[in-house]
């Protein structure tokens, strides 16, 4: 935590957003931030070497925000860690750039954390763009969630199966009161700044898809509590449309990150039989998904030609 500020000027909350060539998303996010009914904020924007007009437009539209510009794209985890080193606030909120929220969200999360000192990390209920629940407050995955994941076909076909229900905490989809989980999304994380001294920052060796799960694992290993507060909402648009096919690179990075996470927390090392088994299974799953996307795309093109 940065201490280079007088005690009289310490903000209550330091808010961190990492961006890269995403002015439209950042503008929407900043509109939510500055429309909040709580404004004792320090807003820190880490720009990962954008080549568009993101930085110029940010300085013009939101001069009160602190902008840190990187000369190269350091990735999301390193960007967030840079933000952690710059914070002065008593509390920290990490936001994905493609989020927006109502004016009461920041104040609501602050009041919850203050009223529940036993909770170390919290998130509001996260919604998709269409208003449906984004199941991002969940438990840690097991090997069975390789088949019954958040967006897998088996979960879509059998939404009430016990593996998905446990992983996605589906017994609390209609909850109105705060509930305990093991893992929350990095789309919105709220916590006391002292947590950084106790747990440290994000592991920059873990690919972005699983960096939030890794940090939550480190927090839970210390016996700390993580909560979802459904009374308050945030919309996470994500940088790809729901239902849109992910690129081969995205699929591979997702599975590589899952392997890194499993190997770090559940295995003795890469020669552990469990690590080798996970590597084979996850690589096979990734390859099958990539092939499936290629075949599906080819079939769509054939059908279009037949129709027209």
Image (spheres, rainbow, N blue to C red):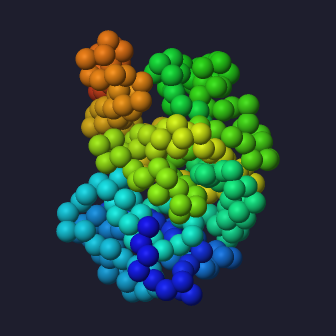
Quarter-of-image position of residue 54: bottom left
Residue 10: in sight, yes or no? yes
**Residue pictured at 60% horizontal, 20% vertical:** 163
x then y, percent, for residue 93: 54, 63
x then y, percent, for residue 140: 54, 31
Quarter-of-image position of residue 161: top right
x then y, percent, for residue 123: 62, 52
Residue 304: in sight, yes or no? no
Instruction: Say if 190 sits above or below 87 in the image.
Output: above
Quarter-of-image position of residue 244: top left
**Residue pictured at 63% horizontal, 44% vertical:** 225
Q: Nearer the viewer, residue 156 or 197?
A: 197
Q: In what quadrant of the picture does the C terminus appear?
A: top left
Q: Is residue 228 left or right of residue 147?
A: right
Q: Is residue 233 left or right of residue 11?
A: right
Q: Which residue lies furthest to the left in this view?
A: 71
Q: In this view, does 94 lie to the left or right of 288?
A: right
**Residue pictured at 47% horizontal, 19% vertical:** 143
Q: In what quadrant of the picture does the N terminus appear?
A: bottom left
x then y, percent, for residue 269: 29, 23
Q: Which of 39 and 147 is in front in this view?
A: 39
């Amino acid at each position: 935590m940065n201490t280079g500020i007088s005690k009289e000027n310490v903000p209550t909350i330091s808010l961190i957003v990492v961006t890269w060539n995403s002015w439209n998303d950042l503008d929407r996010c900043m509109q939510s931030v500055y429309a909040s009914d709580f404004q004792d904020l320090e807003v820190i924007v880490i720009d990962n070497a954008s080549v568009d007009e993101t930085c110029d437009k940010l300085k013009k539209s939101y001069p009160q925000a602190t902008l840190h510009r990187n000369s190269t794209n350091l990735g999301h985890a390193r960007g967030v860690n840079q933000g952690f080193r710059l914070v002065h606030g008593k509390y920290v909120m990490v936001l994905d750039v493609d989020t927006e929220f109502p004016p009461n969200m920041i104040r609501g999360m602050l009041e919850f954390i203050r009223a529940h000192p036993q909770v170390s990390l919290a998130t509001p209920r996260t919604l998709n763009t269409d208003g449906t629940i984004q199941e991002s407050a969940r438990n840690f995955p097991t090997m069975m969630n390789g088949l019954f994941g958040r967006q897998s076909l088996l979960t879509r076909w059998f939404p009430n199966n016990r593996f998905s229900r446990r992983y996605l905490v589906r017994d609390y989809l209609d909850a109105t009161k705060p509930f305990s989980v093991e893992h929350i999304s990095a789309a919105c994380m709220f916590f006391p700044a002292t947590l950084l001294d106790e747990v440290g920052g994000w592991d920059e060796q873990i690919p972005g898809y699983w960096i939030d799960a890794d940090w939550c694992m480190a927090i839970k290993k210390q016996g700390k509590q993580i909560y979802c507060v459904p009374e308050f909402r945030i919309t996470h648009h994500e940088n790809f449309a729901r239902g849109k096919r992910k690129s081969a690179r995205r699929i591979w990075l997702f599975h590589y990150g899952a392997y890194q996470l499993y190997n770090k927390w559940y295995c003795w090392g890469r020669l552990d039989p469990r690590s080798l088994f996970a590597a084979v299974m996850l690589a096979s799953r990734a390859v099958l998904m990539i092939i499936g996307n290629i075949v599906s795309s080819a079939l769509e093109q054939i059908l279009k030609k037949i129709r027209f």
